[in-house]
Image (cartoon, helix red, strand yellow):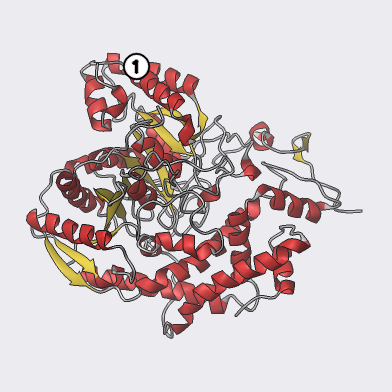
Amino acid sequence: MSVDAETVRRVAHLARIAIAEEEVENLRGELNAILAFVEQLSEVKVEGVEPMTSVTPMAMKMREDEVTEGGDPDAIIANAPAHAHHFFLVPKVVE
Amino acid sequence: MTDLTSLTLAQARDALRTKEFSAAELTEAHLGAMAKARALNAFVLETPERALQMAKASDARLAKGDAGPLEGLPLGIKDLFCTAGVRTTACSHILDNFVPPYESTVTANLWRDGAVLLGKLNNDEFAMGSSNETSYFGPVISPWRRHGSNAKLVPGGSSGGAAAAVAANLCLGATGTDTGGSIRQPAAFCGVVGLKPTYGRCSRWGIVAFASSLDQAGPFARTVRDCAILLRSMASPDAKDTTCIDLPVPDYEKAIGASVKGMRIGIPKEYRMPGMAAEIEALWQRGAQWLKEAGAEPIDISLPMTKYALPAYYIVAPAEASSNLARYDGVRYGLRVGGRDVVAMYENTRAAGFGKEVRRRIMIGTYVLSAGYYDAYYLRAQKVRTLIKRDFEECFAKGINAILTPATPSAAFALGEKGGADPIEMYLNDVFTVTVNMAGLPGIAVPAGLDAQGLPLGLQLIGRPFEEETLFALGHIIEQAAGQFRPRPWWN
């Protein structure tokens, strides 16, 4: 499988990364080189093989559903690029 | 007084207890060495005031006789570990003003045991790279040079700053992370010891995530013993990481000098790559011979899925990365670049904040997870991963205790030499290390010799899950036989 310019633009948008038109061709080449490399996997017989979900067999840890920390809004917003009254500020989303 | 920076971590620990020098003197010596070695670009942030404060607190505890296992020992920390109040960036522009309000579990364990923070170490951006050239803070320069050459070499990556700093005597040990070889490959390139523990041995809490099913923290040091000492402190059960195992942490140092008599050492024929340098092949055979002389038994084995590990990795790791890195959106922390609406703000922020290699991997990951391609790529790669792990399990079931391989297919290369035109060229560096992450196993890289140009070469030992002690015992045999390798300090 290989990707065309339109797919590069679509994937960039899905990934929320702005790309300039002059970058498309270069990215297309790089992505296709990687996809060609991983293509070898198609020769492996995987019928009946379980996909790996956990590399170390272990049961999921359970705990009581209770608040263990919190109540520190100053720490939460300390690194925010824009904030007001303990809220994160974003560009207007709803008209 | 001897040069305090050339001591091993174990020697410094013992000397602090007998009061041969103070923790403050030891830290000052390292801060001095760091200041003279800025040409290496190993540290992206030096924390001298905090270091001296921590060292003085250690001296007070040493005087009272309640020293921790790492009391007063100065360490460097890869910039992927969140350190409370100390800037943590993953060496990415998107996080270059981030100051975590919390501490990673691994580093918290180190400070609990008395260690001293010298500063944050350079790495490839978000740990994506094998040469430390993708760092937003610029590349690390290896302390090693080829005979008769001033060409700048890469230290390997992604934990390039850690490997270089340990090799150049800027710290007694360091932390790294390893997703596909990011501890073992730079350790081999810089002639130091690096261990990737079993997946789940160290908590991932507070470490900037790259590929969560592969990431694992581990130590760098100049000796196998020093790595064993560091791992004992780094590893712990942790309720904050559900993939972190609830197993007691052994006293790994006790494995140093333990007998390896009768251990069966697998020599996998698939690691004999076409075009591999003859000196790597010779080094590998020498390693097997050393282990044999110590009473172990080298046995030819087969790991038939080996060649598929790297391609499967380049589906699984980017897929997980694209998901993990979705959090960098310019809202809660890090860089923000404005746009006409919120989506444009996301897109502009991520375009400006991520470097080329990170953007490329996020896009590959997004593609392989996108509708219509998931089964063909991601699901197939996860099935191949099951088969890779099965290869190892079958060998271990037949009584193999550990597996010996070369650590890397070549010695260190020059800055700018690889991956410029074709990203795959750089990815191939990890061909011997990536299988271990895919199977969740522990692996250690131990320096084993120098090539014809005078550059270090390493051997890798791969162990059974949670049997790091076997790796320390065997690694120590190789270290004793091979000796140690130090670069000539041209940067002073």
Q: Quadrant of residue B267?
A: bottom left
Q: Residue at x 28, y 31 (%)?
A: B9
Q: Is residue A51 visible?
A: no
Residue B247, percent from left and from top = 31, 50
Q: Quadrant of the N terminus of chain B?
A: top left
Between B228 and B206, the residue placed more toward the observer is: B228
Residue B354, percent from left and from top = 64, 50
Residue at numbered disc 1: B25
- In the picture as drawn, the residue positioned furthest to the front comes out as B148
Label 1 CA crowd tier, 10 Å (few <14, some 14–19, many 20+)? some
SS class, disc 1:
helix
Answer left or right for B267 relative to B142.
left
Q: Residue at x 34, y 51 (%)?
A: B197
Q: Quadrant of the C terminus of chain B?
A: top left
Q: Is residue B481 visible?
A: yes
Answer left or right for B83 relative to B289.
right
Residue B243, percent from left and from top = 43, 55
